[in-house]
Image (cartoon, grey):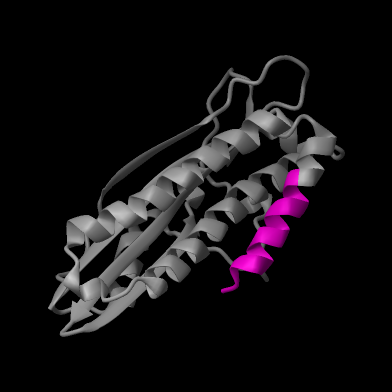
Amino acid sequence: MRGLAKVVYLLALAAGCAGGAPSGGASSATRPAPSPSPTTATLDEMLRSDLAPHRGMPWSAGRPLVWSDFQGIPPQGGEEAAKTAYGIYYAWKCRGGAFQFRVVAAFHPRESWVQAAVLGDSSGSPRVLAHEQTHFNIAEVYARRLRAHFHQIATPCRRSDVDLAMEAQRLVDEEKALQRRYDAETGHGLRRREQAEWEAAIGRQLHLAGQ
């Protein structure tokens, strides 16, 4: 039996609601996730172990983000109104010829923050939160695409972990690129028409991607 757990950590920044060029962006890092031995742990246990240090909150259609989820301390200065930190966690295991795959998009409360000025802006605050939620929704779209892709691979247990990791990385790179495009086209949420279009488009993609 063999198995591998990986986690992709990402940060999504929202620019301030005031005028001016936004300086926010997205950064990410990929590394092997510390987890129990795949020979003794189930995939769900492996992912729960990976989420625990970040108190990761899995994406849920019935539980959208609220500002109280953003528990980090915002930096002083800068133009960013809020930061969403999240991870895309995935793991697979082969037992004989049986292939198992799990993936979770999870929000990191302690690494996410919002500026006090945003919370005090009754008109702008919901728009900033919607921008952040859409970042998280994009992550969930790609978690579902990863799940669908790995379920469609023919005889995955005959392929090496390196080969399977490359398959996953291709989709992870697509997700990063889409996050950057989202911020660029919406002006980090400042362009209301484009923001509304992206929210609707990602909502449709969630529906099409299934569960």
Compared across the picture, whether 136 is left or right of 51 comes to right
Q: Position of residue 4 (x, y in %)?
A: 21, 64
Residue sitting at x 39%, y 46%? 9
Q: Is residue 203 visible?
A: yes
Which residue is nearer to you in this view: 168 or 67?
A: 168
Which residue is nearer to you in this view: 14 or 103?
A: 103
Query: Compared to 76, does 190 lie above or below?
Result: below
Q: Position of residue 123 (x, y in %)?
A: 87, 38
Compared across the picture, whether 204 is left or right of 150 comes to right
Residue sitting at x 56%, y 40%? 179
Compared across the picture, whether 21 is left or right of 157 comes to right
> Split into 4 quadrants, where in the image is the C terminus?
bottom right
> Split into 4 quadrants, where in the image is the N terminus?
bottom left
Residue sitting at x 68%, y 68%? 207
Which segment is the magenta one?
Answer: 198-211
Q: Position of residue 41 (x, y in %)?
A: 21, 77
Query: Compared to 37, does 142 lie above or below?
Result: above
